[in-house]
Image: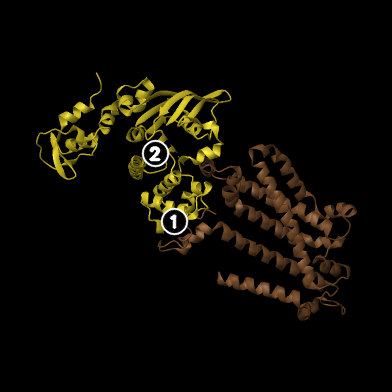
Amino acid sequence: MSIGLAMRAAAAALLVAFLVAPQAFTFAFAPFAEGGAPAIYQQADMLDLALNHLALVAAAVGAATLLAVGLAILVTRPFGAEFLPLSRAIANIGQTFPPIAVLALTVPTLGFGAGPTLFALFLYGLLPIFENALTGLSTLRPAVREAALGVGMDAWQRLTRVELPLAAPTILAGVRLSVVISIATATIGSTVGASTLGEVIIAGLLSNNLAFILQGGLVVGAMAVLVSDGLTQLERLNGARPRGFRRGAPTGAGAPQGGRQGQGH
Amino acid sequence: MIEIDAVTKVYGEATVVDAVTATVPSGSVAAIVGTSGSGKSTLLRMINRLVDPTSGAVRIDGRDTREEPPHVLRRRIGYVIQGNGLFPHRTVAQNIATVPVLLDWDKRRIAARVDELLELFQLDPAEFRGRMPHELSGGQQQRVGVARGLAAGPNILLMDEPFGALDPIIRAKAQDDLAAIQKRLGTTIVLVTHDMEEAIGLGDAIGVMDEGRLLQFAPPEEIIARPASPFVERLVGAADRPFRLLSLARCGDLAGPSAASGPAIDADTSARDALADLLWSARDAAPVARDGVIVGSVTREALEAKAAGPR
């Protein structure tokens, strides 16, 4: 566990160091730059590109989460059950339609820049979140559902106090999946003028510079791994509060959360 | 008082509950017995409107249950289900506090109430408040489930096979505890079970259901002695009848003045256990003690007379 933590910290430190001072890594990439070509991409600030990249992903997945969870909530209510096939279809189409085709189709209406990429990532991110939210919300133990009704919770209270908290780990897993996919996919946004790390890769492809392709790819890969890792930790924290508990009190004495009596929420 | 007035529930073609009428007086325990699919759970769930009757009405203390929104009604009625249905993401204290929180009690009152209930159910508050449901044994979960049902001090407690998931020894203890707490709080209880023994042990009145109809609704003695139909008789178990009758009597009530020797039997022991004791120790009579003082003796003859059915 501590080795894993150390490796994570080292990878994060390396990534940040590269983004802040890419020139310091010239030695590593110079062997891949042929014929005196620059070893480090300099047309734009690397840190800016990375932050724009992440912001784009965050905005797209954030919007996809809102819509997907909203739809999942809707179709698991009695009045919304009819919309299940339609919602599934929307989420499936979003996933199967190639993002590059979405870019091509949306550029005429949204123009060059971040817009088409945002839209493509949003569509692409819907399905994993929707399917996971649906699973989380529809696999509630019948006894728990019955108890929530029986104690006199209204529909909103059942949703916010019982269903969503219990489905949260599953929903979060879907969000993580979408984030990872989107971090990788966002690179193609640079073909239509979005400011992402794809710019570095594309510059490398155009000028036949392997060093650019490598550094673009590595940064995107490292970000995807680290973000996924961080979200996994979050899931564990959220889903395993009960389990972590037992670990915390192996002697069976004094429950660590003993002070939290009665405060329902 | 719960008045169930010609209540019927129809799902499509099937009549699950068929024109059931019964009255459960305040402070009493009604046990509904029947095989699975007899409609007993549906009948119970119509009292707190988890199921709405197709026709008929349910009145609580004279008020029709349809006069208020179902979720408001349910906060006044405790509800305990099989497998307890505790919220797995909430601590024991939060589970018990569910209804008081819904009713907007203030924090201090809720905390005090939670501790009071934990103590009532013999769970040390300091130890159990912060535990999660999965860290409890089955018996402890069941007690927390009942504590949650009683948290807001409801007049009525509905229980659907509350002891179904417990092993026999813990079940007997849980039944005794429930009987004691019911006596202390005076709560009206409607309990659904498929176990006639449990119904006889806990019920002031027993309702027997079959195919949606309430075949008989009467005190246990009458159900045993004068079953209204062959089905009721079968459910009581013809061979068990004398012993079931005995289990309803305390041996203290059957004690006479004659002298007897050997170890004394406590006056609160059921007549059935007293007879078992006499048979096992091969005695014709045994002294009966109340609070350690001999108050008389009980004879095998008196017990056998008690076990005889009507003729």
Residue B35, image x, y percentages: 43, 29
- Pointer 1 residue: B129
Chain hosting mark 2: B
- The answer to whether B134 is drawn above or below residue B54 in the figure is below
Asked if residue B225 lies left or right of residue B190, the reply is: left
Q: Nearer the viewer, mark 1 or mark 2?
A: 2
Q: Colour of chain B?
A: yellow
Residue B228, image x, y percentages: 36, 20
- The answer to whether A130 is drawn above or below residue A46 in the figure is above
* Residue A217 vs residue B255, the one in the foreground: B255
- Pointer 2 residue: B187
Q: Residue furthest top?
A: B311
* Residue B256 vs residue B10, the one in the foreground: B256
Give the crowd class for mark 2: few <14, some 14-19, many >=20 residues within 10 Å: many
Count the numbered circles shown: 2
Residue B134, visible in the rendered structure: no
Between the C-alphas of marks 1 and 2, the distance is 24 Å
Chain hosting mark 1: B
Residue A186, image x, y percentages: 78, 61
- The answer to whether A62 is drawn above or below residue B178 in the figure is below
Residue drawn 84% across the image and 72% down it = A44
**Local SS, label 2:** loop
Residue B66, image x, y percentages: 54, 31
Asked if residue A198 lies left or right of residue A176, the reply is: right
Q: Colour of chain A?
A: brown
Residue drawn 58% across the image and 25% down it = B12
Amino acid type, label 2? Thr
* Same chain letter for marks 1 and 2: yes
Residue A26, visible in the rendered structure: yes
Give the crowd class for mark 1: few <14, some 14-19, many >=20 residues within 10 Å: many
